[in-house]
């Protein structure tokens, strides 16, 4: 008697090969038989006409805080993810001393746009060391599995105190202690180490992140914590000194490359195309290829669409938040704001004004917002309504700027009226990166590179502006079925990118494939019905915090360790998900 049998589905096994039709039998959380299963089961699922895949593995999320209070881990669970890796970009919440709780909250609030009020209310803080943190996470059942990287920022604050916040260089003693604590974290099950070196990342107070200016000696010294270990990965995010010239680019790359070499482990960094350095991604690919030739398992995390933000009256940012007349109603509930903004006299007054400066001391709004407003006429060439079903690859003629020209109206009036649609709940999509040429041809080139990894979903982060945890669904729908503006990808390749390739990179030998003996993390998908829903704002975080969520239709079932956790878009209440500890005994496929 099996626990579950999935019958008659088309199996994409995670290897990238063509699918085959077969049954899958599951017992005690593992796949025990694939083929023509004749035995009976406690439950059977008819998968005829559907595709069956391994559960998706997301290597780039920021659930570090949310995982301590939330058992559901939406929105990742809504999009077939069964394992999520957090601690990316060097931000997180362990190790930590009680006196530094607020520092780490401001850091996460500024870098990843997670409301500080929600973090203050939700974080349980029943840990100090990183092993303590893992133990705390391990106690909570949840829908999906999680794995955690040791993040550089809290580690630096823990060892250096205020010297870390004021960007002082680490001493030899500091580096030795950071290496010791990283080794301790790895031996407790951390899946790797992550650092952040982006000029865009700042705390909620506008300060630089602690790890942003770490020296070569510090990074390589910490990376040597991996010596003698046969597990773990290292990750980095950097702007590679885009605006400072070739010499600074070369210096920054050499620091990151030495960090990767010192670890001796697989390494990944974020890759995207930026408008103000449109060819730099090609240089980064070339450097990554050279690094691989030098013996480093170097990978590039790429997103399957633009790295973009949503603007709306309930979002972190919208174009009218600095207008004096709008600021007079900014604290009202949305419905009351919308009623006032529909008044023609109020509208005329707002549109007659200029915006005040948004960023600065005491403001949580980043300087980028002021830059966007200064160049709004140009930026609005990339303002789009994504519609339903959502369309993230739209031509220039669909932009709000193009609409304003076509209708002969002022741009700000078009933006004003657009944001008032759907009772003020309409969102404007702004693709910041990966959309320089207003198409995804370069994104396709990135994804097809042999060193590319699917990444950058940022699940759990940027909750007031971004909902890219839906990217797995987008990978399947847009890139294998719906794309009309260029070449597509084949479905076996995309499924491998979401499953087996991810597990291989992370060294997770017990998942990522449909194979007898492996953990039964599985998606059953009605491909004809598979579709993302438009993002919407929900007020469901602790302390009344809000976040963008994005559902999907077409996931017949998502299964974790043999339990159905999501069925036809509804959570079942099952919570088999646990903490994955790297370097610990794992379920290995039968020979």
Image: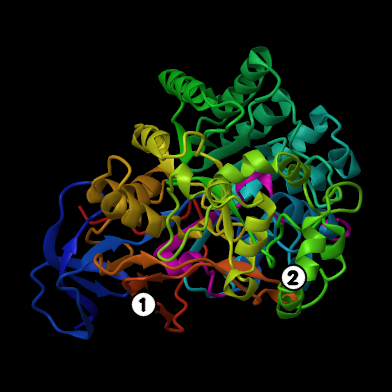
Q: Is residue 529 magenta?
A: no
Q: Tell me what residue is drawn at x 60 percent, y 62 percent.
A: 418
The quarter holding residue 174 reads: top right
Read off the residue under disc 2.
Answer: 344
Q: Residue furthest bottom?
A: 42
The vertical placement of 519 against 18, above or below, is below
Q: Residue furthest front?
A: 408
* Residue 314 in the figure: left or right of residue 427: right
Q: Tell me what residue is drawn at x 69 percent, y 37 percent.
A: 179
Q: Tell me what residue is drawn at x 35 percent, y 56 percent.
A: 510
The vertical placement of 289 against 337, above or below, is above
Read off the residue under disc 1.
Answer: 563
Whole-percent x, y for residue 287 in the image: 49, 20
User: Mark 2 or mark 1, which is nearer the start of the sequence?
Assistant: 2
Pointer 2: residues within 10 angstroms few (<14), some, or many (20+)? few
Q: Is residue 91 magenta?
A: yes
Would residue 585 be visible to someone looking at this image? Answer: no
Q: Nearer the viewer, residue 35 or 262?
A: 35
Q: Which mark is residue 6?
A: none
Mark 1–mark 2 distance (CA, rounded to whole Å)? 55 Å
- Mark in front: 1 vs 2: 2
Whole-percent x, y for residue 498 in the image: 36, 52
Whole-percent x, y for residue 590 in the image: 23, 56
Total number of numbered discs in the rendering:
2
Q: Nearer the viewer, residue 267 or 313?
A: 313
Q: Secondary structure at mark 1?
A: strand
Q: Residue furthest top?
A: 247
* Residue 244 in the figure: left or right of residue 573: right
The quarter holding residue 539 reads: bottom right
* Quadrant including the N terminus: bottom left
Whole-percent x, y for residue 376 in the image: 69, 43
């Amino acid at each position: 008697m099996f626990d579950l049998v999935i019958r008659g589905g088309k199996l994409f096994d995670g290897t990238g090969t063509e699918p085959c039709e077969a049954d899958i039998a599951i017992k005690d959380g593992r796949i025990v038989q694939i083929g023509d299963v004749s035995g009976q089961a406690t439950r059977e699922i008819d998968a005829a006409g559907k595709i069956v895949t391994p559960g998706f593995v997301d290597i780039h999320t920021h659930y570090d805080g949310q995982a301590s209070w939330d058992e559901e881990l939406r929105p990742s669970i809504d999009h077939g993810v069964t394992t999520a890796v957090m601690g990316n970009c060097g931000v997180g919440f362990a190790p930590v001393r009680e006196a530094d709780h607020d520092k780490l909250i401001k850091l996460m609030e500024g870098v990843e746009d997670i409301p500080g009020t929600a973090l203050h209310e939700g974080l349980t803080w029943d840990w100090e060391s990183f092993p303590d943190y893992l133990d705390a996470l391990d106690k909570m059942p949840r829908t999906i599995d999680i794995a955690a990287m040791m993040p550089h920022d809290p580690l630096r604050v823990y060892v250096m105190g205020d010297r870390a916040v004021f960007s002082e260089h680490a001493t030899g003693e500091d580096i030795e202690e950071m290496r010791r604590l990283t080794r301790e974290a790895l031996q407790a099950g951390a899946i790797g180490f992550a650092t952040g070196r982006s000029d865009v990342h700042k705390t909620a107070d506008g300060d630089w992140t602690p790890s942003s200016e770490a020296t070569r000696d510090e990074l390589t010294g910490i990376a040597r914590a991996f010596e003698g270990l046969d597990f773990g990965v290292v990750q980095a995010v950097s702007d590679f000194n885009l605006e400072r010239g070739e010499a600074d680019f070369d210096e920054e790359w050499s620091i990151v490359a030495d960090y990767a070499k010192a670890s001796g482990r697989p390494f990944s960094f974020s890759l995207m195309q930026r408008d103000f350095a449109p060819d730099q991604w090609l240089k980064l690919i070339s450097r990554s290829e050279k690094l691989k030739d030098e013996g480093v398992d170097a990978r590039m995390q790429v997103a399957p669409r633009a790295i973009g933000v949503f603007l709306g009256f309930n979002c972190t940012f919208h174009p009218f938040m600095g207008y004096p007349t709008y600021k007079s109603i900014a604290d009202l509930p949305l419905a009351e704001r919308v009623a006032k903004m529909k008044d023609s006299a109020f509208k005329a007054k707002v549109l007659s004004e200029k915006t005040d400066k948004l960023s600065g001391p005491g403001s949580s709004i980043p300087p980028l917002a002021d830059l966007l407003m200064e160049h709004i006429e140009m930026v609005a060439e990339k303002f789009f309504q994504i519609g339903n079903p959502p369309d993230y690859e739209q031509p220039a003629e669909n932009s709000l700027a193009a609409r304003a020209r076509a209708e002969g109206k002022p741009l700000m009036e078009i933006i004003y009226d657009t944001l008032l649609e759907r009772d003020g709940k309409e969102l404007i999509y702004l693709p910041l990166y990966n959309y320089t040429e207003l198409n995804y041809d370069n994104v396709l080139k990135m994804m097809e590179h042999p060193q590319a990894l699917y990444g950058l979903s940022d699940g759990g982060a940027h909750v007031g502006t971004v909902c890219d945890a839906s990217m797995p669904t987008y990978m399947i729908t847009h890139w294998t079925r719906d794309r009309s503006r260029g070449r597509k990808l084949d479905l076996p390749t995309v499924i491998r990118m979401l499953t087996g390739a991810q597990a291989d990179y992370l060294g997770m030998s017990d998942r990522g494939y449909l194979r007898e003996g492996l953990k039964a993390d599985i998606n059953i998908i009605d491909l004809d019905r598979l579709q993302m829903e438009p993002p919407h704002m929900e007020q469901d975080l602790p302390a009344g915090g809000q976040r963008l969520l994005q559902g999907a239709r077409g996931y017949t079932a998502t299964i974790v360790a043999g339990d159905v956790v999501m069925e036809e878009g509804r959570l079942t209440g099952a919570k088999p998900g646990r903490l994955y500890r790297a370097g610990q005994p794992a379920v290995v496929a039968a020979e």
